[in-house]
Amino acid sequence: MSYLPIQQVLKQAPVGTDVTIKGWVRTKRESKNAVFVAINDGSTIHNIQAVAETGQLAEDTLKLITTGACVAITGQLVESQGAGQAVEVKIANVQIYGSADPEKYPLQPKRHSLEFLREIAHLRPRTNTFSAILRVRHALAFAVHQYFNDNGFYYLNTPIITASDAEGAGEMFRVTTLDAIKPPLTEEGKVDYSQDFFGRETNLTVSGQLEGELGAMALGKIYTFGPTFRAENSNTTRHLAEFWMIEPEMAFHELEDNMNLAEDFVKTVIRYAVQHCADDLAFLDNRLKEEEKTRKKEEQSEMGLLEKLQFVISNEFVRLTYTEAIDILVNSKPAKKGQFQYEVKWGVDLQSEHERYLVEKHFKKPVILTNYPREIKAFYMKQDADGKTVRAMDVLFPGIGEIIGGSQREDDLDKLVARMQEVGIEPEALWWYLDTRRFGSAPHAGFGLGFERLVLFVTGMGNIRDVIPFPRAPKSAEF
Ligand code: 4AD
Ligand code: MG
């Protein structure tokens, strides 16, 4: 039986034609004369209503049409008598694909908490909220590829299993086939990784950047878009142990070019979502408004979701140096009143409370901070002439904090090697990375956008675990 996605039926099927729809029952309602079934197939936020006259359907069939059951319905598309929908399907035939015992099916047609839905991540895509998020997520991913393709970038697939720690933070998941209970040992009593699958210690990648740089030094402009893993034990609403990162890397780009690209890129993909996900974003906008009503007045945000997205697209990001930002923070009200949890002074890594103060209170706009102290940034960043700062840039967003981190790269071999030695990275271990500085080195720059942080921002959700289908976080890898 051929069928049409509900999205297409609602948009383009002419009234009067026979259609077949297939999907999951959201609700069933019986009145004196008729039974109304709302069906959703995930192609759109909108349900389609199917109607049968009372007594038309066999008792056995009617009993199986319950929330969560999967059905195929054929019938004529007619103008709806009721309010709320323009058309509906006059049921001629129902086929039950799979029933869903109402006593046991966990998703009832009522508002469930996000915490509860996280426990049933295998079923939550069947809710309005999560199907909307997943469609927006898809649109953003598509927009990412489209943006880079349109701008002359090549999609480079960097390895997921690596032997290096690109960020030097040591927050890695080991990949091994050695016996966990009795691994082979060296004479000094350490685990002998030379006997491991790859003949050395390996881990899941924390970033594709180092290999991305190799690509940029050959293809000019590349980007990666792949899974990234961090074993940081931070149980926050903005961290995942497995997340997707987009990392463009460009030859002949310096810090300023990098900022220009980051700003244009993030605005373009958000604009794409606004233009192509109107129904889903309208739903999420509404969801957020309802949620805000339950908050205290001073904790409610000044803008709705759609307003906020429009605001980001149409305003220039503020650009300032780390040093200027520290000045603002040190002289801020919360600093003077001791309201920041973490101390703020030149040299410290900014905490999210500081980032959010700058973005949400001081500038009320997205901010790009540059030229951070070298001590708090990764070894590969280009050193400034003052010997104190590096050409780093972080893009900070309202409600999110850091959404993008990047920099111009150190292209001078001697400076790079000296910096590696300072922070305890053996230059020999990254001989292949250093070769790009030995042979045809060039100024280059790049950045990483955390895809889930972008989806978090665009959907207006509050917890990063709700914008990836199956989140991975400390003590959580069920599905
Ligand atoms: O700032 P990060 O650590 O930078 C890098 O990894 C560079 N190699 C990127 C580059 O220059 N090519 O991470 C980049 C972004 C952050 O700004 C944040 O959006 C996201 O990745 N991110 C996370 N997202 C979710 N969960 C985590 N645990 C994340 N850690 C970083
Ligand atoms: Mg960062």
Image (cartoon, rainbow, N blue to C red):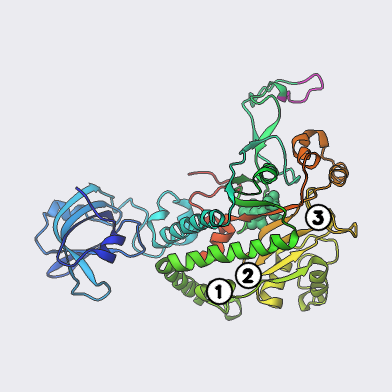
Q: Amino acid at mark 3?
A: Ile
- Crowding near pointer 2: few (<14 within 10 Å), some, many (20+)? many
| Callouts 2 and 1 close, C-beta under 8 Å | yes
Question: Which residue: 37% across, 55% down?
Answer: 126
Residue stretch in magenta: 186-193
Residue 296 included in the magenta stretch of the image:
no
Q: Is residue 102 left or right of residue 264?
A: left
Magenta highlight: main SS: loop
Q: Which mark is residue 289?
A: none
The image position of residue 222, as x and y in percent, is: 62, 48
Q: Is residue 352 left or right of residue 105?
A: right
331 vs 214, nearest the viewer: 214
Residue annotated with mark 3: 376
448 vs 152, nearest the viewer: 152
Q: Quadrant of residue 310?
A: bottom right
| Callouts 3 and 1 close, C-beta under 8 Å | no
The image position of residue 54, as x and y in percent, is: 11, 64
Give SS at disc 3.
helix
In this view, 277 is above or below 218: below
Give SS at disc 1.
helix
Residue annotated with mark 2: 398
Q: Is residue 185 left or right of residue 71?
A: right
254 vs 308, nearest the viewer: 254
The image position of residue 95, as x and y in percent, is: 18, 50
Residue annotated with mark 1: 308
